[in-house]
Amino acid sequence: MLGSGFIARFYADSLHAQRRVDRIHRVYSRTLANAKRFCEDYQLDGYTDNMEEAINHPDTDVVLIALPNHQHLEAVLASAKAGKPVLCTKPLGRNAEEAKAMLDAVESAGVFAGYLEDLCYTPKFLKAVKSVEQGNLGRILWTKSREAHPGPHSDWFWNKEFSGGGAIIDLGCHCVEISRNFIGKQHKPMEVMCWADTQVHPIDAEDHAIGLVRFANGAIGQFEVSWTFRGGMDLRDEVMGTEGTIWLNSFLRTGFEMFTTGLGASYVAEKSESNSGWLFPVGDEAHELGYPHMFTDMFDALEKGTEPRETFYDGYVVNAILDAAFLSAKSKQWEPVLLEDWRGEAPGNAGSHFREHDADHWLIKQEILPNGDVKLILKNKLTGAITQQLQ
Amino acid sequence: MLGSGFIARFYADSLHAQRRVDRIHRVYSRTLANAKRFCEDYQLDGYTDNMEEAINHPDTDVVLIALPNHQHLEAVLASAKAGKPVLCTKPLGRNAEEAKAMLDAVESAGVFAGYLEDLCYTPKFLKAVKSVEQGNLGRILWTKSREAHPGPHSDWFWNKEFSGGGAIIDLGCHCVEISRNFIGKQHKPMEVMCWADTQVHPIDAEDHAIGLVRFANGAIGQFEVSWTFRGGMDLRDEVMGTEGTIWLNSFLRTGFEMFTTGLGASYVAEKSESNSGWLFPVGDEAHELGYPHMFTDMFDALEKGTEPRETFYDGYVVNAILDAAFLSAKSKQWEPVLLEDWRGEAPGNAGSHFREHDADHWLIKQEILPNGDVKLILKNKLTGAITQQLQ
Amino acid sequence: MLGSGFIARFYADSLHAQRRVDRIHRVYSRTLANAKRFCEDYQLDGYTDNMEEAINHPDTDVVLIALPNHQHLEAVLASAKAGKPVLCTKPLGRNAEEAKAMLDAVESAGVFAGYLEDLCYTPKFLKAVKSVEQGNLGRILWTKSREAHPGPHSDWFWNKEFSGGGAIIDLGCHCVEISRNFIGKQHKPMEVMCWADTQVHPIDAEDHAIGLVRFANGAIGQFEVSWTFRGGMDLRDEVMGTEGTIWLNSFLRTGFEMFTTGLGASYVAEKSESNSGWLFPVGDEAHELGYPHMFTDMFDALEKGTEPRETFYDGYVVNAILDAAFLSAKSKQWEPVLLEDWRGEAPGNAGSHFREHDADHWLIKQEILPNGDVKLILKNKLTGAITQQLQ
Amino acid sequence: MLGSGFIARFYADSLHAQRRVDRIHRVYSRTLANAKRFCEDYQLDGYTDNMEEAINHPDTDVVLIALPNHQHLEAVLASAKAGKPVLCTKPLGRNAEEAKAMLDAVESAGVFAGYLEDLCYTPKFLKAVKSVEQGNLGRILWTKSREAHPGPHSDWFWNKEFSGGGAIIDLGCHCVEISRNFIGKQHKPMEVMCWADTQVHPIDAEDHAIGLVRFANGAIGQFEVSWTFRGGMDLRDEVMGTEGTIWLNSFLRTGFEMFTTGLGASYVAEKSESNSGWLFPVGDEAHELGYPHMFTDMFDALEKGTEPRETFYDGYVVNAILDAAFLSAKSKQWEPVLLEDWRGEAPGNAGSHFREHDADHWLIKQEILPNGDVKLILKNKLTGAITQQLQ
């Protein structure tokens, strides 16, 4: 385990739970005291402030990177060099260039590599993606992923040099990959339009941003990210298709509602902001955030020699999209997604999706009126004239 | 009453209900049969297919325009000419030029004019705006208004020439005015970024669009409009401020949930798409959509000689914003909102909003950790260094 | 208007709103100062502390009783004597004996009488009842009505002699009449089982009770009432039928959700208990509680010479059911509902409702399994043997 | 594993998932073909239709009973005789007598025994109980647990002789134990009032029941169970205390909402009744139903030599409460819970819980009025007089 902070503890809590077979052996942190405390808390075999030592230790079968963003590259390169399988937390890089270097390193070294994108592993998300893949929603038109809270826990997040950006890099990486899963990873992300601003916090990076990613098949992946939201952690996804829609709420409204006058004042949930009034705890936070299913997929894939659902290549594509978002926020126009290494479908012609009513007409809409009548709105294919008729 | 279609009926149902004092006297429709049927259904005094006759009739105290978009201008000009108070449905014009002509006409004639923007009058919205004005949410950073359904009822909506556009003009007018109310009408809308596409229906206009409006105070008004949504009528608003957030759901989740195997098959709600399974009816549709409170404000203002909450000037600003949205959807960049007649505050300097921790530091974030510790993340005003400390 | 307290103000706010034609002319209160203040607040013609004077005043077309429970009888008798139409707030009497005396008085005098049971007039409830009547839920099996909050506003409620009881009489009257509407008023309430206790408040009456009312058709009307609930005003109804279910939430979850850090501290909603954290205001409280639709029905019925939806006879039946509830809470067994004057259907044989599979078998259940198989569980009519088969 | 039906599969899916260390070795079923299929599906070591053989097999470290209710006793006695730890599904017995025999058997034999009451292990429930134990809700006054669906999957459930009853025994066992956890297992269940009826299905047992359990501390545990509910599987719990309330929804409203026109028709969730319209799937059913956390507790306790959260003694108390419920449904009065073996606190005096205002007065209620005034309602300790005063 490289890292001993907030996310490292979430990982450890998820791995050392529910009678799982996998165990963390040792921990690295730049600050030895932190490493020691983590080691004791999770009863590990050892700790160190020497990254190479941790990676190369013979007991280390897999390297698990839970470090600040600016240390991912170094850690991945060292793991690849050591020939060890590596799992890296999100975002993969601070930008596509870093991500590509990591991707190349693990592929050259031939080591297993997994991208720890937990929100693409929440049980709700996995079932929703499956439902989309089964066609329950028809052709996907739009997805929206929203992640908003009052800001991250550690100081390095707020430092643009260490993090690579603000809310876009911290939260947008989740949202963009969620969209890719729903829309289909084979569809190339073409261009991005993004607004970003620093509205509240005295930082150089953005603390609020909204972006649209246009995919080759015409679908739009929208992201809404913010470090300025008040009210807890807002994690919501939506998908719209020609045959249906899905709404997911992963944190603030999951069927657990509680009112308390505040007599007791115990910890309620990650990023919750109050301890009285109406509160919305989550049953099992790690589970709701996807950690257990993520590690199951990672270690199962490692053992079976298959690819995990989320790979370093995915992390690279995500970084490339976010790079375009940063550019667009400055240029104030749509910016192309630059992907020197595209492995999905070549962008093609989406083709016509119109529904035919009869040989001469497209069907615009069919509707049941309050009185039971069925109304059709039709368009003449030749003349373009729009008419309505009751059936 | 000018018009006898879907919206005219909603208006009549709202006016002739709950023992209100106001009454519709006569109705105009281009199609005499429709006018006759409407007249009979609501037991009016008369009907006609001559617009001027309806307007100039001595019993007509107020002209109520519920016509297709391309007829608003003509009807308003005729009303102004007749010196009659006029209430016009949304959007005011097909574009800002038409809206400005209507605004000028009523102001020159000195007649009372109200903009029938019903969704700015829903009881939830009125209370939410009041709460925002009282400061419960602090400084407003972002609003989102979403209106999505499977498409409008009448054929003229689908014809760009008659309607002035697709989902943007039909639904975006609501969303933009909702944002202006939350952000404050005194703040000038500066520029718009908009994506629009025709994803499903065989029409020339857009059936899906997403836009961002940047206001002079830095707040963003987001709109999401669609004629491609499946699942009913999705009406949701959100507001984020520095001290809180509001989420409104005006149609699909209002505390009325119903499951039926489908034995009975009665009308459930406007734009609902099924009659079995889980359904989400609305108690009193007209009320939930704002019609009663809208007409109360309009007629009260008329009698008191004050301005209604929603005026022709508001309608004009909305059209100007939507004009910029249409432009942006084509140019693929932010487009300025062109307002030759701006009556709010001059765009100024937003000023710094940062919170001070002490003389040397800004406060980035304060947080209570699971173990009860309070963590501060600070930024040195001079050096910009970001540090964290536990209290 | 007789009374000037909390409920009188809700009535006045509802009547003097939304451009309604009806007006309150004068107000009576035992305390002259309260009458005066009420008169001024609502700009009435006059006030008095002499009830007879108020009733007999020539401007008084209708008597509206918003008095404490122990004054209803006196006020109704005086109104009947004066030959004036009378509307009385809930509960009608402190017990069935009082209610019967009022019913007899208005019927003897031949005056119009309406029972102001507002929660049977909420827009959601009206639509739900209509849906039930249309058969969307099949045969009704069970209803549940829950009303719970931290306790009423005025002192007299807490005094058993004035109120006639505690939460049962104050809130149970709503719940029982809600159940009767869903189940069908023609079905006779047969017996009641009730638990009641004084769990929190230092009073003689119950502050928490749960009861079951068995109707002649086998349906159960459940009520849950409490003055000990923390979290606001909990108003929820449920109905179960053989073909579906309805869930209504009339106050705490109506599509209006708000988080605030508490910077502003304004009034949020009736019986809300906090001004920060997550709050759940209601758009238009009077509307959501049924007052406008109630008065519309009352005055429309009065003008048309028909019966309102809720009559003094209904109030009497409700009191008789609550009498049985009080008895049962003491006797700890089911107690019969004593109705000397029953105007609905005579209790008969409910008959068999079983579904036949074929000549020899009843169908217990049909189910689609995860693998798509259809499983039938059958009961042999003769032998009673239960078997399952896959189709 | 004894049993190969619906619940056995849920158990196996939960155990053989998420990289857990524990494994099922062999399976017993009365029907050899079912045992064989189960063995193959889960890749076990062997199968048999001889229960003793399965129990006594040297590879069997723990006996897991997932049999119909009437086989629990036999299986537990055999396990005790074999000296093997035993985990038994719910309900423990068909009645308290059977349960007591099982409890005595495992205690005499000194074998570890766990009661597989999964709904007391859902992550939401565990966190809610912890919150209650921390005092966030104050003194618990009332709990409600509701489990309702259209009826169970297998034929034996519908046969009273095999199951021991209908919805009460099948679902009430969950609800009663949920109440005990919230109220505190140390508080003795004193008496039960229960209504039960066979409203829909052609069976001898009840398909709908509602009951109240009164505990020694005055708290009420309410259960609502039904095999007649339409709309899916309704799993809701509520708790009310003097300082707050908790609402849990474990199945139909967990933050996953989906609308589909029905193009795809895949399995959505346990006991869901439709495949189109609005659907409410659950992310990870086994997790939401508590299976993983239940088995973790059981095997952890077994290894550590401690007691699991849910023991055979708990199962026995539950059966005793349900016995009283069946009696009450017939006798139509409250029936005492007969517990020859009570291990909790002796029922004592609950004591006064009233809040004092000053030396002479109890505080009935304190309330903030819309205008900001604070109103107190007081009761004189000596005279009992109730007064109100504004502060």
Image (cartoon, coloured by chain):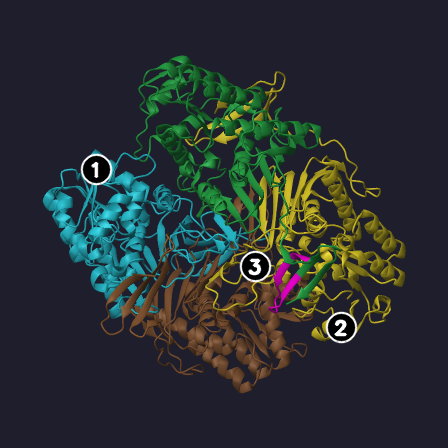
Chain colours: A yellow, B green, C cyan, D brown
Q: Residue A349 magenta-drawn?
A: no
Front tag of 1 and 3:
3
- What range is drawn magenta here? B361-376
Label placed on residue B271: none
**Which residue is denoted by mark 3 in the rendering?**
A273
Residue type at mark 3 is Glu
Dot 1 crowding, Cα within 10 Å, few <14, some 14–19, many 20+? some
Residue type at mark 1 is Leu
Cα separation, mark 1 vs mark 3, equals: 53 Å
User: At which x and y percent is residue B351?
Assistant: 63, 44
Q: Earlier in the sequence, mark 3 or mark 2?
A: 2
Q: Quadrant of residue B159?
A: top right
User: At which x and y percent is residue C238?
Assistant: 39, 52
Chain for disc number 3? A
Residue A4 seen: yes
What secondary structure is found at the residue carrying circle 3? loop
| Depth check, front residue: C256 or D8 | C256
Q: Residue B374 magenta-drawn?
A: yes
Examine the rendered structure and indicate whether residue B281 appears above or below residue A274.
above
What secondary structure is found at the residue carrying circle 2? helix
**Which residue is denoted by mark 2 in the rendering?**
A33
Front tag of 1 and 2:
2
Cα separation, mark 1 vs mark 2, equals: 82 Å
Do the CB atoms of the residues marked 1 and 2 lie less than 8 Å apart?
Answer: no
Label placed on residue C302: 1
Cα separation, mark 3 vs mark 2, equals: 29 Å
| Depth check, front residue: A210 or C307 | A210
User: At which x and y percent is residue A126?
Assistant: 65, 52
Q: Quadrant of the N terminus of chain C?
A: top left
Dot 3 crowding, Cα within 10 Å, few <14, some 14–19, many 20+? many
